[in-house]
Amino acid sequence: MTEIENIRRKNRERCLTVTQGALPKGMIHLLDETGFFTAPAARKHHGAYIGGLYDHSEAVAMELADLTRALKLEWEREASPVIVGMLHDLCKTQEYVLVKDKESGTYKIEWNDQQILTGHGTVSVIIAQQLASNLSDFWLTDEEMLCIRYHMGAFTDAKEWEFYGRAIEEYPNVLYTHTADMIASKIRKL
């Protein structure tokens, strides 16, 4: 079994345990088909390694669940912290490609310059909706979609801040999703 296959298998098994049914097995299978369990989270920042996207997503899901417990946050659906955390960066399954160096056998992370869709949060929502459309037992709530869409917070273009603010007013958990992402990426470095 190759290094990548071992990472894929290990992360898929972890996901089944961590999500505890928040994501149905069908969704986990579809995530596997996108390369979610082996994709990097970045080229040069947090999670810039094979499987980094899964590690980062799990960390965000756990941070969001911790914030929910500590602050007694209310969600439309109890499983939302895990769902949002796991799906918030699905765009990264298309943003990066792993390229194997023929001489050393190591992998480099390259930017995928063949992408068609842009917009970090928007693309993640689109991919999540496409995957969910293949399942009869899973969908995203409006709150989950907005948490994924605006999880970058003020790190988005300033033209979007007005819409980000409105999303927080409608669904305060949008702000906490961004906070969980920052804790995972900037403090825990995952």
Image: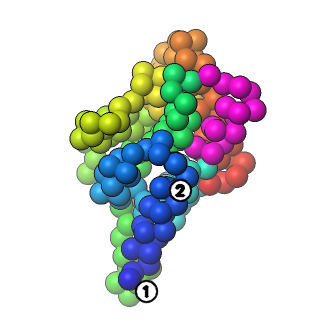
Q: Which residue is mark 2?
A: 17
Query: Mark number for residue 104?
Result: 1
Taken as a whole, is the magenta stretch helix, strand or loop?
Answer: helix
* Residue sitting nearer the eye, 13 or 121: 13
Identify the residue at horizontal 52%, vertical 48% (top origin): 20
Residue 61 is situated, as x and y percent measured from the top left of the image, at 58, 43
Q: Is residue 114 rendered to the left or right of residue 120?
A: left
* Residue 118 visible in the shown view: no
Q: CA distance from mark 2 to mark 1?
A: 35 Å
Q: Amino acid at mark 1?
A: Ser
**Are dots 2 and 1 in contact, CB under 8 Å?**
no
Part of the protein shown in magenta: 60-74
Q: Amino acid at mark 2?
A: Thr
Residue 38 is situated, as x and y percent measured from the top left of the image, at 42, 63
Identify the residue at horizontal 74%, vertical 27% (top origin): 71
Identify the residue at horizontal 47%, vertical 28% (top origin): 144
Q: Quadrant of the C terminus?
A: bottom right
